[in-house]
């Protein structure tokens, strides 16, 4: 936390959505002085993104807020009977087992992570992120609009406007994170290039309340797709009835021709569209809100200006920009606790939030392993491995109290970890020596000691190193370096571990 009076805060975060809220929470958790601002009076007032995958839950678990997310989200077994129909009450065309809810895939999901998938709309996720960030020391200001910024060799000066008083003032920060959405003013002002196309389709959102349990309880799903060929508007003639809370809070998405005039969407027209896709005029429908929006196939090709950053090679709309006029790559890596927090928008409309707390993929020390072979599609199936650059595999362990703990639970939480086995005591001593030399905390984890047993034998099958070997795990849970066995001399172990950490930290 900064004590330098020339700065008002270490990091200024613009926007309190999933990207901004999680950035503020991560930074505050790790003791970084943080200020978060949002131009509106509170967090999202519509559900927006909602599908919450396992990696996101792992990040929330690492931050100690997973229980709050699980309490607010819809569980996995109520998410996955995705239905295609002529209308909700009409003919069912088919069902697709999705989100790991089907018997064929559920075991793969559960073996890959200690966390399930859930459905957690932004209206429920954002308060968890922002409230916990504030409790951990982040200064959160609402009704505060970002106006402009200026970078120099030492930091960023941002001009903000208090929307209640109407006056403007400046905030001096070492870094600024722009998490202000797809039309980011921060990204525009620092000149981040945006690739792709905007305005490729028109959509409307209608939030409504109705008891639809008789059409949904027997086929529980987050998404019900209604095919309406021949509709006078609707883009592709397919509407989405999306569950927000089972089975009475809903969001309907329907298309319109982006080339024409935007439609008039008053309450009567919204109710007509809802009842048409439901297929039952007797349902009591309460229209809660309506909005029009456009579908964009665009993405940022760079994350930052003046700070070590990355490019988005996968074409993901990140919703995150970062700036500071500081070109020392090593200093940036050490200071930036988040390399990327991604807000993914899928091809047709927006569905999911993905938080991925991770360092740059180059922050590893490759070993001499043969090139990895993938028998199955690597985009669709998990393949646990401990090779550098991979996320530490999940395996259940048993602690001294007889409680199950994931391998992911014994690493992370803002520290590097050294993971070894019963006969790997040399690595504990090497970790202590490296921590002292580099002045960083390093956690030692010895599996198969009385306090942490591989009771099910799964870790032994996944670790890919000998019992006296070692894994160096980054604070984000990714493997940075590994050695199959321990060397004969403690001095050699210390030297090798120190060299690996020095390379990862780019010192």
Image: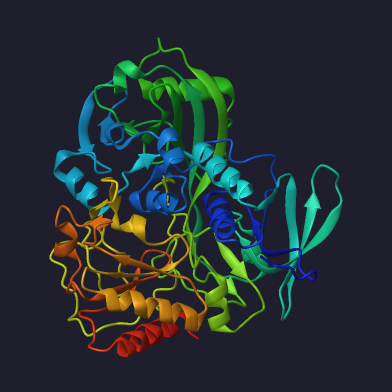
Q: Is residue 316 visible?
A: yes
- Above/below status of 450 relative to 17: below
* Side (left or right) of 151 relative to 495: right
Colouring style: rainbow
Q: Nearer the viewer, residue 117 or 297?
A: 117
* Rendered residue at 23%/48% (across/down): 109
Q: Nearer the viewer, residue 119 or 394?
A: 394
* Rendered residue at 45%/59% (across/down): 413
* Side (left or right) of 122 relative to 239: right
Q: Nearer the viewer, residue 486 or 209?
A: 486
Q: Where does residue 391 sit, x and y in percent of width and height?
A: 31, 65
* Rendered residue at 43%/21% (across/down): 248
Q: Where does residue 8 sit, x and y in percent of width and height?
A: 76, 63
Q: Quadrant of residue 34?
A: bottom right
Q: Where does residue 355 sit, x and y in percent of width and height?
A: 44, 55
* Rendered residue at 21%/34% (across/down): 95
Q: Where does residue 1 sit, x and y in percent of width and height?
A: 66, 65
Considering every residue shown, the one lying at the far top of the view is: 282
Q: Quadrant of residue 102?
A: top left
């Amino acid at each position: 936390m900064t004590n330098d009076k020339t700065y008002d805060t270490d990091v200024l975060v613009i926007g309190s959505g999933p990207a901004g809220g999680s950035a503020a929470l991560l930074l505050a958790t790790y003791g970084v002085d943080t200020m978060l601002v949002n131009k509106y009076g509170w967090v999202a007032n519509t559900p927006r993104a909602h599908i919450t995958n396992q990696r996101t839950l792992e990040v929330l678990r690492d931050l100690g807020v997973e229980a709050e997310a699980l309490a607010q989200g819809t569980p996995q077994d109520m998410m996955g009977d995705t239905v295609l129909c002529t209308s909700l009450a009409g003919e069912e065309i088919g069902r697709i087992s999705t989100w790991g809810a089907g018997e064929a895939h559920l075991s793969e999901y559960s073996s890959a992570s200690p966390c399930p998938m859930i459905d957690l709309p932004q209206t429920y996720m954002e308060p968890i992120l922002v409230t916990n960030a504030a409790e951990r020391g982040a200064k959160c200001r609402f009704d505060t609009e970002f106006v402009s910024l200026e970078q120099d060799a030492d930091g960023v000066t941002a001009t903000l406007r208090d929307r209640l008083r109407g006056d403007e003032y400046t905030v001096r920060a070492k870094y600024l994170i722009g998490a202000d959405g797809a039309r980011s003013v921060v990204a525009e002002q620092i000149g981040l290039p945006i690739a792709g196309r905007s305005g490729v389709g028109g959509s409307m959102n209608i939030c409504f309340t109705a008891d639809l349990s008789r059409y949904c309880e027997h086929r529980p799903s987050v998404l019900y797709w209604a095919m309406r060929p021949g509709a006078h508007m609707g883009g592709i003639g397919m509407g989405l009835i999306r569950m927000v809370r089972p089975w009475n809070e809903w969001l309907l998405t329907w298309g319109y021709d982006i080339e024409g005039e935007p439609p008039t969407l008053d309450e009567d027209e919204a109710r007509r569209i809802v009842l048409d896709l439901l297929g039952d005029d007797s349902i009591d429908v309460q229209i809660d809100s309506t909005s029009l929006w456009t579908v964009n196939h665009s993405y940022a090709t760079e994350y930052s200006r003046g700070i070590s950053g990355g490019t988005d090679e996968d074409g993901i709309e990140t919703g995150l920009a970062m700036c500071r006029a500081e070109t020392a790559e090593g200093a940036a890596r050490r200071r930036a606790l988040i390399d990327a927090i991604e807000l993914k928008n899928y091809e047709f409309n927006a569905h999911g939030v993905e938080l991925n707390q991770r360092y740059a993929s180059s922050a590893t020390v490759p070993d001499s392993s043969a090139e990895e072979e993938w028998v199955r599609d690597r985009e669709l199936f998990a393949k646990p491995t401990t090779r550098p650059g991979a996320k530490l595999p999940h395996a259940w362990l048993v602690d001294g109290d007889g409680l199950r703990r994931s391998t992911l639970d014994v690493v992370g939480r803002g520290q590097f970890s050294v993971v070894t086995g019963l006969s790997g005591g040399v690595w504990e001593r090497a970790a202590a020596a490296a921590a002292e030399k580099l002045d960083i905390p390093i956690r030692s984890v010895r599996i198969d000691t009385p306090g942490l047993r591989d009771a099910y034998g799964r870790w032994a099958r996944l670790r890919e190193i000998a019992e006296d070997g070692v894994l160096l795990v980054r604070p984000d849970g990714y493997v940075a370096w590994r050695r199959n066995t321990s060397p004969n001399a403690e001095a050699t172990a210390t030297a090798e571990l120190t060299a690996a950490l020095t390379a990862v930290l780019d010192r």
